[in-house]
Image: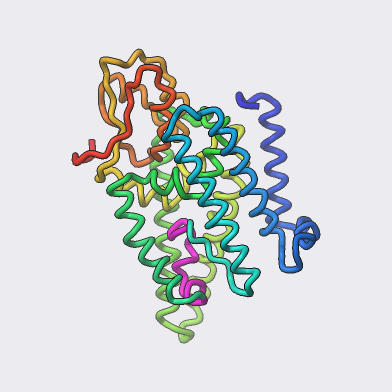
Amino acid sequence: MRNRGWPAYLLALVLLGFYVALYFSNVFDPLAKRLWAGADKWTLYGILYTVAILVGGSVYIARNRRSTYQVRRTLVIMGVQLALAFLLPIWMRLLGGKSFYFSYLWPLKIDYFYPSTIFSYPLAFALYSFLGSLLGAPLLAFFLGKRWYCSWVCGCGGLANTAGDPFRHLSSKTRWSWRFEAITIHTVLALALISTALVLINWGMGPKHPTFARVAFQVQQGYGFWIGAMYSGLIGVTVYPLLGTRVWCRFGCPMAALLGLVQKFGRFQISSQAELCIACGNCSKYCEMGIDVRSYAMRGEAVKRASCVGCGVCAHVCPRGVLRLELVKTKAI
């Protein structure tokens, strides 16, 4: 299953079937109604998603308990998912309000910049979304690297680093995949910016321009379905056993693209000591983002790639202590 054998393809088909049923049918609604009257299939999905992270995270901690960094990082991922992405939104619904996911920001949670969505919440929520997305997230990425979000907070990365961790070594390390990544992830970021801009312009123009409103609505709906549902959800998770766990994060996530651009000019990097490197290749093999870390280590260069999520596994699996996660005051390499 971990090496693309027939069990891996079988698991991929099972995941595909689950997501198709989830998105295109109401087969899970009767089961969700047994939880409480207001529950639906997305409530059930939230439970399954959270359980997968908690169970997968527990197994990951047990296997990597000697690494303080990995234990702390995984505990935070589990806590954020349980509290901010599951229990708090559920509690808000039980109190008669609307769910709000504090662990997700624009442009990943793109509708939190759509006026019709965000202004339906209290003003404090709108301020949190705007300031967190435009100011807080970029500043933290500059000083701490994009790892603060991609490897410590985000639910997409959380599932990848817990339940999906056994498949991390399947990520492609080829130069072609790196070039493809640079094209696709920035294309999705551009689409997110265009969609957001059209929705904001349409909101500012008011109801006097029905043609423009129709175009803006179609773009909004198209982005939500093809990127938000099909790409990040159905494809992103289904391919875990075949292409690794960070396909969405690496090739599609607009949040990762935006924070990655900031990271290249920020303080975070993974330093290396060429004189200690024995070229075993463990660092590259287990890099979930497909970075050929060994090539950097053999040259004694720091890894300061926009795609690096700072999970720290490359340093953890290195038998010689060649790699080290650092915050430095240097320009991008």
Residue 324 horizontal/vertical position (percent): 32, 29
The correct choice, above or below, for 331 with respect to 95 in the image is above
Please report the residue visible at 67 percent of the width from the left and 49 percent of the height from the top.
48
Image quadrant occupied by the C terminus: top left
Residue 175 horizontal/vertical position (percent): 39, 29
Name the one closer to the observer, 190 or 292. 292
Name the one closer to the observer, 72 or 316. 72
Please report the residue visible at 34 percent of the width from the left and 21 percent of the height from the top.
321
Is residue 11 visible in the rendered structure shown here? yes
Is residue 177 visible in the rendered structure shown here? no
Colour scheme: rainbow
Res. 229 image quadrant: bottom right
Image quadrant occupied by the N terminus: top right
Q: Single out the residue that lies furthest toward the left.
A: 330
Q: Single out the residue that lies furthest toward the top.
A: 278
Looking at the image, how many numbered discs can be counted on the residues? 0
> Is residue 94 shown in magenta?
no
The magenta span reads 104-120
Residue 174 horizontal/vertical position (percent): 43, 28
Please report the residue visible at 67 percent of the width from the left and 53 percent of the height from the top.
45
> Is residue 110 shown in magenta?
yes
Please report the residue visible at 67 percent of the width from the left and 37 percent of the height from the top.
12
Position of 186 compared to 119: left or right?
Answer: left
Position of 280 compared to 15: left or right?
Answer: left
The correct choice, above or below, for 103 with respect to 210 in the image is above
